[in-house]
Every structure is written in C-alpha cells, then in structure tokens.
C-alpha cells in the first residue's frame, strides 16, 4: 500500500519549485501566473475527472484524479497550505456522520 508520504514528498517538491524559473518549471510557471490560472487548472482537471468517470475508463479516471490532486496541491501551496492541513481536517471528521458534519458548518457551506 502506498502511503501519504507521496503527498508530502510532492508537496515538498512543489514548495521547492516556488522560487524556480518559470521558464524551467511548470509549477513555478503556474504559481507565477497567479491564483486565477491555478483555479482554472483545478477546475479543468475536475471536469476531466468527471468525464473520465462517466466514460467508465478506470485508467483514465485514475490519471485524471492524479492530475486533479497535483493541481490541488499547487493550489494549497499557493495559499500557504499543504496536504497535512487537509489530512488533519479529514482526521477531525473521521467517525462523524457526513450529514452531521455538513450541518455543523451551517447551511450553504
């Protein structure tokens, strides 16, 4: 079983690329373009994930989710966050009914 260590290593690589030359690093280029471009990329990958799931192509779905996770990690890094922040939130929610958890955040959240 692959552990969450891969998420942490990927987040570390993203952090290291923050100061890189945008001409030589995709992550640096995306971060340099700003939040709107990062959000567009996350949205694009989310749509591609949905389409892959609808097509029933399991390999394509896995690859699109990997792209979505990667770009989400870039988004988190752009906001000074990382996978540990999300994992801590998931741990907090563990054992709580999804309905109860959603209600605790208030309607519309």
Image (cartoon, grey):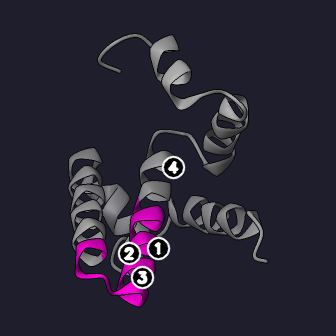
Give how far apart the Cα atoms at labels 2 and 4 are.
Answer: 14 Å
Towards the viewer: 22 or 103: 103
Q: CA distance from mark 1 to mark 2?
A: 16 Å
**Where does label 3 land, which residue?**
63
Label 4: element kind: helix
The answer to whether residue 17 shows anywhere in this view is: yes
Q: Is residue 91 placed above or below 82 in the rendered structure?
A: above
Labelled pair 1, 4 in contact (Cβ < 8 Å): no
Q: In the picture, residue 85 is in which quadrant?
A: top right
Residue at the disc numbered 2? 26
Q: Is 67 placed above or below 15 here?
A: below
User: For this rendering, which residue is in front, 99 or 63?
Assistant: 99
**CA distance for labels 3 and 1:** 5 Å
Badge number at residue 11: none
Q: Counting residues from the N terminus, which is met first, the one under dot 2 or under dot 4?
A: 2
At a point 36% along the width and 71% down the height, the residue shown is: 22
Residue for point 42% across, 82% down? 63
Select label 3 or label 4 by which is in front. 3
Q: In the drawing, what numbered circle is on residue 66?
A: 1
Q: Which circle's residue, 2 or 3, is located before the other in the chain?
A: 2
Residue drawn at x 66%, y 31% as measured from the top left = 93
Residue 27 percent coordinates (x, y): 42, 68
Q: Is the stretch drawn in magenta largely helix, strand or loop?
A: helix
Q: Marks 2 and 3, how far apart in space?
A: 18 Å
Contact (CB < 8 A) between labels 3 and 1?
Answer: yes
- Which region shows up in magenta? 53-71
In the image, taking residue 22 as reference, residue 18 lies left or right, namely right
Name the secondary structure under disc 2: helix
Q: Position of residue 36 (x, y in %)?
A: 21, 47
**Which residue, given by chain and number where applicable, does mark 4 sit on?**
77
Identify the image quadrant of residue 81.
top right
Tell whether position 8 is magenta: no
């Amino acid at each position: 079983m692959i552990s969450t260590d891969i998420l942490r290593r990927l987040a570390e690589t993203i952090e290291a690329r923050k100061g890189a030359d945008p001409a030589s690093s995709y992550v640096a280029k995306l971060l340099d373009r700003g939040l709107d471009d990062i959000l567009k990329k996350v949205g694009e990958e989310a749509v591609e994930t949905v389409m892959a799931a609808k097509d029933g192509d399991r390999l394509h779905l896995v690859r699109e989710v990997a792209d979505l996770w990667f770009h989400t990690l870039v988004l988190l890094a752009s906001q000074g966050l990382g996978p540990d922040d999300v994992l801590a939130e998931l741990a907090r929610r563990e054992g709580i009914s999804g309905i109860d958890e959603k209600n605790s955040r208030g309607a519309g959240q």
